[in-house]
Image (cartoon, helix red, strand yellow):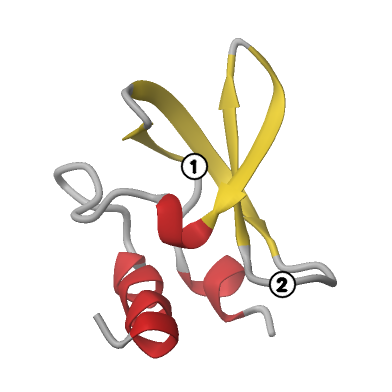
Amino acid sequence: MGTLSDNVDFPFSTVVFGVEVNVTGVDEGPGPGIAAVCRRDKGPQRIGILDLPLPLPSPPPAGSEWIAAHRHWLTGA
């Protein structure tokens, strides 16, 4: 796969579930879906890429249209 990790400018900050986090990359490993790798205070946490809020922070990171395209491809939204 590699398209998100190759085309989105990581890291970037955003708010997930009311908490500011630093998104450092994506985990495109085996299993369902792609996970955003987020950091805050402690070690990395993975959340589904579809759980990242849209729109992303202003200004959005370069390549964020890849996240939006992936969301649209999976959900049609």
The picture places residue 18, in percent across and down from the top left corner, at 31, 23
Identify the mark at residue 56; answer none if there is no mark. Answer: none
Instruction: Determine whether 62 is above or below 23 in the image.
Output: below
Question: What residue is drawn where x is 16% and y is 47%?
Answer: 59
| Amino acid at dot 2 | Pro
Question: What residue is drawn where x is 60% and y is 10%?
Answer: 41
Instruction: Determine whether 76 is above or below 31 in the image.
Output: below
Residue at the disc numbered 2: 32
Picture quadrant of residue 3: bottom right
From the viewer's perspective, tell me whether residue 63 is left or right of residue 47: left
Q: Tag 1, which secondary structure?
A: loop
Q: Tag 2, which secondary structure?
A: loop
| Amino acid at dot 1 | Pro
- Which residue reaches farthest left? 58
- Neighbor class of circle 2 (other Cα within 10 Å; few <14, some 14-19, many 20+) is few
- Which residue reaches farthest top? 41
The picture places residue 76, in percent across and down from the top left corner, at 30, 88
Picture quadrant of residue 58: top left
Question: What residue is drawn where x is 59% and y is 27%?
Answer: 39
Mark 2 and mark 1: span between their CA atoms? 23 Å
**Quadrant of the drawing holding the C terminus:** bottom left
The answer to which of marks 2 and 1 sits earlier in the sequence is 1
Question: What residue is drawn where x is 43% and y is 79%?
Answer: 70
**Quadrant of the drawing holding the N terminus:** bottom right
Residue placed most toward the observer, 47 or 59:
47
Identify the mark at residue 11; answer none if there is no mark. Answer: 1
Instruction: Determine whether 18 is above or below 28 in the image.
Output: above
Asked if the residue under mark 1 is in contact with the one under mark 2, i.e. CB atoms within 8 Å, the reply is no
- Neighbor class of circle 1 (other Cα within 10 Å; few <14, some 14-19, many 20+) is few
